[in-house]
Image (spheres, helix red, strand yellow):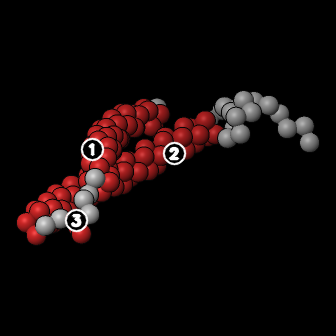
């Protein structure tokens, strides 16, 4: 009777793996929410800057320098925001890969449990078979 207990004890591994997967998915959700929030702030700001840009031909030299400096600052700030979004995207990618690996482990463990239980049922005096017929007889 040791084998059935061993197979059922693997369910604790499945439960622990599910908890790890939940934590990873929570990380994905937080990073995704951050990416969306950043995008929601940056896109309208950039659209406003583009639509309200003065014509360079109508500016005097000092004002033109001021506008160009402001644009360079905006471009630099945008670059910093995009770098942060890239970090968040890498975090999403990492957590997703980790979650996929955890799900693969869960699947492998569950298949092992299933195989172990089926070998016990098939090896004993049970009428159960792998096709879940539960004792149905083949009348061919």
Please tell me whether mark 1 sits on a helix, a strand or a loop. helix
**Residue drawn at point x = 80 percent, y = 31 percent:** 136
Q: Is residue 13 visible?
A: no
Judge left or right: residue 86 versus residue 128: left
In this figure, which residue is indicated by the disc labeled 2?
111
Q: Is residue 40 left or right of residue 75?
A: right
Which residue is at the front of the view, 111 or 125?
Answer: 111
Rendered-image quadrant of the C terminus: top right
- Going from the N terminus, do you reach mark 2 or mark 1 first? 1
Nearest to N terminus: mark 3 or mark 2:
3
Is residue 56 visible to the viewer in this orientation of the structure?
A: yes
Residue 14 at x, y percent in the picture: 39, 38
Residue drawn at point x = 48 percent, y = 42 percent: 110
C-beta proximity under 8 Å, tags 3 and 2: no
Mark 1 burial class by Cα count in 10 Å: few <14, some 14-19, many 20+: few
Picture disc at residue 116: none
At x 64%, y 39%, the residue is: 122
Badge nearest the viewer, 3 or 1: 3
Using residue 118 as the reference point, say whether residue 53 is left or right of it. Answer: left
Residue 135 in the image: above or below residue 20: above
Residue for badge 1: 41
Label 3 – label 2 distance at C-alpha: 73 Å
Assign a secondary structure to mark 3: helix
Dot 3: within a 10 Å radius of its alpha carbon, few (fewer than 14), some, or many (20 or more) residues?
A: few
Q: CA distance from mark 3 to mark 1?
A: 30 Å
Q: Which residue is mark 3?
A: 58
Depth check, front residue: 129 or 14: 14
**Residue at 15% across, 62% down:** 67
Secondary structure state at the residue bearing disc 2: helix
Camera-side residue of 62 and 66: 62
């Amino acid at each position: 009777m040791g084998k059935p207990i061993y197979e059922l004890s693997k369910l604790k591994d499945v439960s622990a793996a599910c908890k790890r997967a939940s934590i990873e998915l929570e990380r994905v959700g937080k990073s995704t929410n951050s990416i969306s929030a950043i995008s929601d702030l940056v896109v309208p700001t950039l659209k406003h800057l583009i639509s309200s840009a003065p014509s360079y031909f109508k500016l005097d030299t000092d004002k033109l320098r001021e506008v160009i400096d402001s644009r360079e600052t905006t471009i630099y700030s945008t670059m910093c925001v995009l770098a942060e979004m890239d970090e968040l995207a890498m975090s999403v990618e990492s957590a997703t890969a980790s979650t996929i690996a955890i799900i693969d482990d869960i699947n492998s463990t569950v298949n092992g449990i299933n195989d172990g239980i089926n070998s016990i049922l098939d090896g004993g005096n049970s009428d159960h078979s792998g096709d879940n017929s539960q004792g149905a007889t083949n009348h061919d």
